[in-house]
Image: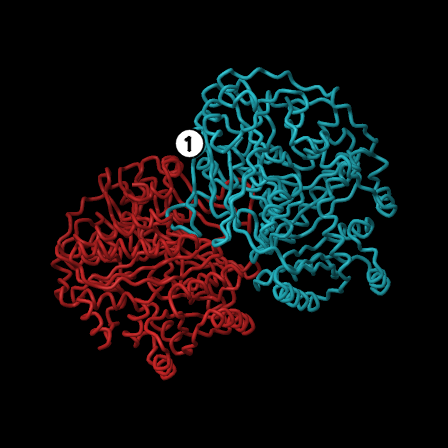
Chain colours: A red, B cyan
C-alpha cells in the first residue's frame, strides 16, 4: 500500500511536477557575470527506483498493531518522500541518489484520538517518532534520526484535516495536516482567512506552522502564526496537554507558548485553534524604489513604531534589487512606469520596496495613506501596481526557480535572522562580510542578497539568499561552512539564529548560544517530563 | 535599621495615609437599600505596636553574610509590611491585629548582581525566598509561607530601580523595583510612556507586572504587560536565564513566556526590557450609555474583531452602572449633559461605557471616529467628556474607597476572568447565579457588579466587584466560600480563573483544572530544574 495523498509533488524537490520556472536572459547574464554559472555543472535527477536508502528495520508488532496495519507504509517511495525536508542540502542528498537517513516506516494516524496510544506504544517499544506535516522544513526539522532507538517512524499527519469554525469568537480549530491552501479554502468558503502565507504556503501544514513559529509574508498585517494561535493541543507519550481556550490568562507561564515552537520534541500537535478574520475585501499591491536599503529600513521602522504597518512591507537591499530587476518576469517590474523611472533617476543602485494594503476598502486606504506619507518623506519613488502584483504572483514561485537552478548545478540557499533596530546595520554588514569571506575561501562565486521584512516596533527580520557556484569541494561540503560563518556573525551581532525557519537539526548547535545553558536546561526538563523515553523527534532543537 | 523607602503607605491597608475617600449620600443610600450597611459593624484599626505576629526565626549566618548585614531587616514594622498583599482577606488579617504569617526577615538586594549569590545561599541553607515588589497582590502572591524550610525571607527589590533607554529600538530596560509612577516619570522625562496602568499602578512594580502577567486599564491600546516585554532576565538559585534580545525568534518554545507569569516560583526577575512609545499627544475620554450590558459588549466585540479598539473601552453591567451613577463624584457623571440624558431616556437600566482615545492627534481622532460609528450603530447615547475624565481621575482611587468601606466593616472584593466571546453570556449568568446563591447562603447582603474590559478579537475579560455585609460568620469565613463558588462557575463555563490577577496562593487549588495535569507537570519540571531545593516562593502557583 502507498500513501497517495502526499504524492502530488516532485519526490526529489519542490512542488507540482508540472510547474517549471524559467530564467530571463537578463538574469542568465547577471548570473554569468557573477561567475555563478561557470562554476556549476548541470546535475541530472536520478530515477526514483535507483535511489539507495538504508535498509528498513521492521517495526515491533505492538507498534504496528497500535497504529493499525493499514496505517503503516514501508514502500521505498514513501520512505524516500519522508526522508528529508527542503533545504539545499536535503535536495542535494535526494538528487545524489543516495539517502543516508530514511524512516523505517511511515505511519499515518486516522484521528487525533489515535495519537496517544500510538505514541505510548512507540515509547514502550523503543521506536523514535518524527512528526511529519508538509515536509517543507529547511533546517532538517523532520530528519528521521534513529538516535538511540531501535527504529524510527515518520508520523504523517495527512489525515488530520478537520475544521471547526466559531463565528462568534472568530476562531477556527484547524487539523494539523491541513496544507496552507486547504485551510484557506475551507475558511474562504465562509468568507474568512487566516492570512498566513509563508513561502512554503502551498505545501506546509498548520501543525508545522505551529511547531516552528512560522511567519508569513503578510505577517506584518495578520500577525505571525504564534500570535494567531488562541489555544493548542499537544499529544505526548505521557498524555495530552490542552491549553485553556481563553483570549488570555494570567495563570502562570504560557503553556501555549511552550507548545508553539516545540518542533515535535515534546509530542505531536493534532490541531490548533487560530484567530481568523474576514477575507480582505480590498487588496492593493505596489512597488516603490528608495535610495538605499538603509533609507527603506528607516521608513519601515518609522511605520512600525507608529503602529501603522501595512499588511506587507519589505525592502530589498541593493543586490537583491539588482537581481529582482534582472529577473523582472516574476516580479513584473519591466512595466513602462518602471522603465521611465529607471531612465529618469540620476544615480545607480537603490532599493526596491514591495507593499500590500489589505482589509476592508477603508483599511486598505488607511494603510496606503500612512505608508505613502512615509515613503514620500523618505524619498521613495512610486513604481506602480504591476511590480507589487508581480511579486504577489511570483511569491510562492521561488522554490521552483531553485529547482531550475539546481538542475544546472547552482547552489541556492536562504537563511534569516531578526534583531533589534539598534543592531540592524552592524549585523547586516557583519553577515555580508562573514559570508563573502567564507564563500571566497570555498571558491564559491555568486551573489548574496538580503531583504528586510516582518517588522516590529523594536526590530525586524533580515532574510538572506545566496546564489552561487557550489565551490571547490561542491556545495554539500562548502555550504555548511558558509552557513556556520553566517550564524556566528549573526550571533555575535545580537541577532537570533532564526526568525521563522526554526531550529531543527541544522541550527541545534547554536541553540545554547542563543538561549543560554539555563534556558536549554528548562526546555530539557520539560522534554524529560513529557517524553521520558526521549523518542520524540530525536536530534532536533536540544540535540 | 528599618526599610524606609517602602514606608510611605498605610501599614494596614492601601496607599497614602493622607488620602481618604468619601461616600456620596446617594451611594450611602444605595448601600443601605441593599442591606450592606446594616449587616456590617465598624472596625477600628489596631495600633502597629500591638500587632501580634509569629516569632522571627533567626537567619543562618551564611545567608546574612551573603545578603550583607546592612540589607537584612528584622524589625516588626518591616515584617508586618511584608506579611500580606492587598486582598480583602489580607487586609482583614492586618486589621485583626494578629498575623498568622510573617517573613522571618526582609532582605533587600543592592543590585541585580547580588541576587545570585543570595539565592544560592538561601537554597544551600534551607531558607525560602518570597520575592516582593509592591506588595499589591490580591491573590496571596507574596504570602510568606515557610513551607518545609527553616526560615522564610521576603526579598524586597526596592533597590533595583534603574532604567536604560534604547531610543532607536524604542525599548527600555526597567529595574524590577520601579513602581508604576517611577517608571512613567523616568520615561516621561524622555517623552515616552509604557502605557501600563493597572488599578494598582501607584504602588505595584515592574517586576510584579512581569511576574503576574499584569494587564492595565489602557491595555486595549498599549497591550498587556506580557505583550510589552521584549526580553527578560530571571535569577534562579541555579543560575541566570536571559532571553534573547530580539523582536522575535523561532528558536524553540518561548522562554520569555516561561518567565513572564512565573510568579517567583522559578526565581527572581531583576529587570525587564519593555517596548515603549511616545507619550500620547492627545487624549480624549468620554462616557456613553447603551441599552444593556449585552448591547455594550456587542459593540466592543465588533471593534475588537475589526482591529479598531480605542485605548480604553469598558462596559459596566446594569448593576455597576447603577452604583457608578450613585457614587457620581468619582466618575464625574453628575454633569448637566448626563442629567438631561437621564431625564430624556424612556426606560430604566442601561449600561455605562467609558472610552479613551490616545496617541497622536490623528490617532486619537481615528480611534474616536471608529468607536463613535460603532456606538451610534449600537444605540449608544453620548454622555460627554466629564464622565470619562471623572473615571480617569478616580481610576486609582478604588482601593481608598475600599479602605473607607472596610473601616465600616463592609466586605469589598473583586475577581476577574476572561473567556471566548461565544461563552460570555453563559459565563456571566452562571457566575452571577453562583455568587448570588453563595452570598445568600452566607447571609451576605450586598451588590455584585461587573464590567467588561480588555477586549480581544476572540474574547474579553469580565471583572466582578462584590460589596456586601460580611455575612453570618464574618467575611473571613464567608468570602472564601463565595469566591470558591465563583471560581467553580467560571471554570465550568469555559473561563480562566484569572485574566490578570494571577494565581498566587488563592487560585492555586484551581490551577490543575485550568492547565491540566500534564500542563502542571511541565511547569513543575521547570521548577524542579531551576529551583531544585524548592525554596522559591513556596505554596504559590503549583502548590
Q: Given the image, what chain letter belongs to the residue carrying mark 1?
A: B
Image quadrant assignment for residue B244: top left
Task: Give coordinates of residue A191: x percent, y percent.
Answer: 50, 69
Query: Which quadrant of the figure contains the C terminus of chain B?
Result: top right
- Where is A425 relative to B487, above or below? below
Q: Do we see residue A273 in this rendering?
A: no
Task: Give coordinates of residue A260: x percent, y percent.
Answer: 42, 49
- Where is A174 relative to B485, above or below? below
Relative depth, front residue between A294 and B145 = A294
At 35% from the left and 79% from the top, the residue drawn is A342
Query: Which quadrant of the figure contains the N terminus of chain B?
Result: top right
Q: Determine crowd level at label 1: few under 14, some 14-19, many 20+ residues with C-alpha closer than 10 A.
A: some
At 45% from the left and 20% from the top, the residue drawn is B124
Which secondary structure lies at badge 1? Answer: strand
Q: Which residue is mark 1?
A: B239
User: Going by the image, does A476 lie left or right of A333?
Assistant: left
Task: Give coordinates of residue B264: x percent, y percent.
Answer: 53, 33
At 42% from the left and 67% from the top, the residue drawn is A185
Q: Do we see residue A51 in this rendering?
A: yes
User: Going by the image, does B416 lie left or right of A458?
Assistant: right
Relative depth, front residue between A42 and A164 = A42
Task: Give coordinates of residue A248: x percent, y percent.
Answer: 55, 49
Image quadrant assignment for residue B203: top right
User: Going by the image, does B212 lie left or right of B486?
Assistant: left
Relative depth, front residue between B273 and B142 = B273
- Where is A114 relative to A22, above or below? above
Counting the numbered discs, the total is 1
Q: Seen from this angle, which residue lies furthest front?
A: A346
At 73% from the left and 32% from the top, the residue drawn is B10
Image quadrant assignment for residue A27: bottom left
Amino acid at each position: 500500500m502507498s500513501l497517495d495523498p502526499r504524492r502530488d509533488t516532485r519526490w526529489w524537490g519542490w512542488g507540482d511536477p508540472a510547474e517549471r520556472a524559467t530564467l530571463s536572459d537578463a538574469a542568465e547574464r547577471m548570473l554569468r557575470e557573477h561567475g555563478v554559472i561557470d562554476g556549476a555543472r548541470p546535475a541530472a535527477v536520478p530515477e526514483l527506483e535507483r535511489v539507495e536508502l538504508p535498509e528498513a528495520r521492521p517495526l515491533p508488532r505492538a507498534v504496528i498493531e497500535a497504529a493499525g496495519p493499514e496505517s503503516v507504509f514501508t514502500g521505498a517511495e514513501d520512505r524516500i518522500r519522508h526522508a528529508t525536508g527542503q533545504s539545499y542540502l536535503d535536495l542535494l542528498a535526494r538528487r545524489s541518489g543516495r539517502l543516508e537517513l530514511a524512516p523505517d516506516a511511515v505511519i499515518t494516524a486516522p484521528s487525533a484520538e489515535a495519537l496517544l496510544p500510538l505514541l505510548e506504544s512507540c515509547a514502550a517499544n523503543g521506536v523514535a517518532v518524527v512528526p511529519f506535516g508538509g515536509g517543507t522544513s529547511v533546517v532538517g526539522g523532520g530528519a528521521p534520526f534513529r538516535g538511540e532507538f531501535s527504529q524510527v517512524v515518520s508520523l504523517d499527519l495527512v489525515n488530520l484535516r478537520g475544521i471547526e469554525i466559531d463565528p462568534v469568537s472568530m476562531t477556527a480549530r484547524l487539523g494539523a495536516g491541513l496544507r496552507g491552501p486547504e485551510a484557506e479554502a475551507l475558511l474562504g468558503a465562509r468568507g474568512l482567512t487566516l492570512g498566513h502565507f509563508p513561502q512554503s504556503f502551498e505545501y506546509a501544514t498548520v501543525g508545522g506552522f505551529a511547531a516552528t513559529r512560522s511567519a508569513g509574508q503578510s505577517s506584518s498585517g495578520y500577525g505571525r502564526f504564534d500570535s494567531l494561535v488562541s489555544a493548542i493541543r499537544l499529544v505526548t507519550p505521557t498524555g495530552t496537554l490542552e491549553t485553556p481556550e481563553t483570549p488570555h490568562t494570567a495563570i502562570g507561564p504560557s503553556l501555549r507558548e511552550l507548545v508553539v515552537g516545540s518542533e515535535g520534541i515534546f509530542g505531536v500537535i493534532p490541531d490548533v485553534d487560530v484567530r481568523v478574520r474576514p477575507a480582505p475585501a480590498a487588496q492593493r499591491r505596489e512597488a516603490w524604489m528608495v535610495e538605499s536599503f538603509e533609507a527603506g529600513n528607516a521608513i519601515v521602522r518609522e511605520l512600525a513604531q507608529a503602529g501603522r504597518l501595512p499588511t506587507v512591507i519589505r525592502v530589498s537591499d541593493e543586490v537583491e534589487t539588482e537581481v529582482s530587476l534582472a529577473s523582472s518576469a516574476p516580479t513584473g517590474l519591466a512595466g513602462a512606469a518602471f522603465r521611465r523611472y529607471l531612465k529618469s533617476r540620476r544615480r545607480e543602485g537603490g532599493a526596491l520596496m514591495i507593499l500590500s494594503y489589505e482589509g476592508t476598502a477603508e483599511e486598505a486606504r488607511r494603510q496606503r495613506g500612512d505608508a505613502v506619507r512615509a515613503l514620500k518623506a523618505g524619498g521613495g519613488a512610486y513604481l506602480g501596481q504591476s511590480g507589487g502584483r508581480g511579486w504577489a504572483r511570483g511569491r510562492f514561485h521561488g522554490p521552483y526557480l531553485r529547482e531550475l537552478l539546481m538542475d544546472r548545478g547552482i547552489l541556492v540557499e536562504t537563511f534569516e535572522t531578526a534583531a533589534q533596530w539598534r543592531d540592524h546595520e552592524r549585523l547586516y554588514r557583519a553577515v555580508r562580510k562573514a559570508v563573502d569571506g567564507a564563500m571566497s575561501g570555498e571558491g564559491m562565486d555568486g551573489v548574496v542578497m538580503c531583504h528586510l521584512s516582518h517588522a516590529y516596533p523594536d526590530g525586524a527580520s533580515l532574510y538572506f539568499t545566496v546564489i552561487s557556484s557550489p565551490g571547490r569541494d561542491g556545495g554539500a561540503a562548502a555550504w555548511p561552512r558558509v552557513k556556520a560563518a553566517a550564524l556566528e556573525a549573526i550571533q555575535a551581532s545580537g541577532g537570533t539564529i532564526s526568525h521563522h525557519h526554526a531550529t531543527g537539526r541544522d541550527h541545534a548547535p547554536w541553540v545554547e548560544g542563543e538561549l543560554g545553558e539555563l534556558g536549554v536546561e528548562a526546555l530539557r526538563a520539560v522534554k524529560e517530563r513529557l517524553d521520558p523515553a526521549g523518542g520524540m523527534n530525536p536530534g532536533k532543537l536540544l540535540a
